Amino acid sequence: MRSPRSRGQSPLTLRGCRIVAPAPADILPNGGFESGPAVPASGILAVAPGSPVLTGWSVMGGAINIVTNNYWQCLSGDRSVQLSSSGPGAIQQSFASTSGSVYRLTFSITGEPFSTP
């Protein structure tokens, strides 16, 4: 039996194969709002600006609400945020990035279903 090298071939030949890198980890901690304080059975918890309770996020402007499936059906997971508890609120998060790299941010947004614009 002749070895592959003796026939002029390398020991391992890959033709028509594509090597795929593993999917990168999420770079935004708590992107689904699943970590944080316990939410009451009502399914809604107000979070004041400057409060650190929503893990990984800073609350800015007005208060926001952490909302669970007990209040409305979240698109993904068990929690979402309502950006207007007592007035217009916002959340923010910073992350390290590399110049020239491409990042994709995906999110879902909807109007508050229990009020009019």
Image: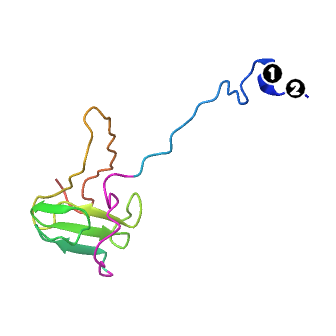
Q: Residues within 10 Å of mark 2 (few under 14, many from 20)?
A: few
Q: Residue at x 32, y 35 (%)?
A: 102
Tell whether position 102 is magenta. Answer: no
How many marks are shown on the rendered structure? 2
Quadrant in which residue 93 is drawn: bottom left
Residue 40 position (above or below residue 50): below
- Tell me where residue 51 appears, x and y as whole percent: 14, 71
Q: Residue at x 22, y 72 (%)?
A: 53
- Tell me where residue 17 appears, x and y as whole percent: 64, 29
Horizontal side of residue 46 vs 75, given as left or right = left
Asked if marks 2 and 1 touch (Cβ < 8 Å), the reply is yes
Rounded to the nearest whole Å, what is the CA distance between mark 2 and mark 1?
Answer: 6 Å
- Which SS does the magenta portion mostly show? loop
- Which amino acid, mark 1? Ser
Highlighted magenta segment, given as a residue range = 26-41
The quadrant in which the N terminus is found is top right
Horizontal side of residue 47 vs 113, given as left or right = left
Residue 30 position (above or below residue 19): below
Horizontal side of residue 60 vs 109, given as left or right = left
Q: Give the secondary structure at mark 2.
A: loop
Q: Residue at x 20, y 61 (%)?
A: 115
- The residue identified by callout 2 is 2
Tell whether position 38 is magenta. Answer: yes
Q: Residue at x 32, y 71 (%)?
A: 71
- The residue identified by callout 1 is 6
The numbered dot on residue 95 is none
- Tell me where residue 18 appears, x and y as whole percent: 59, 30
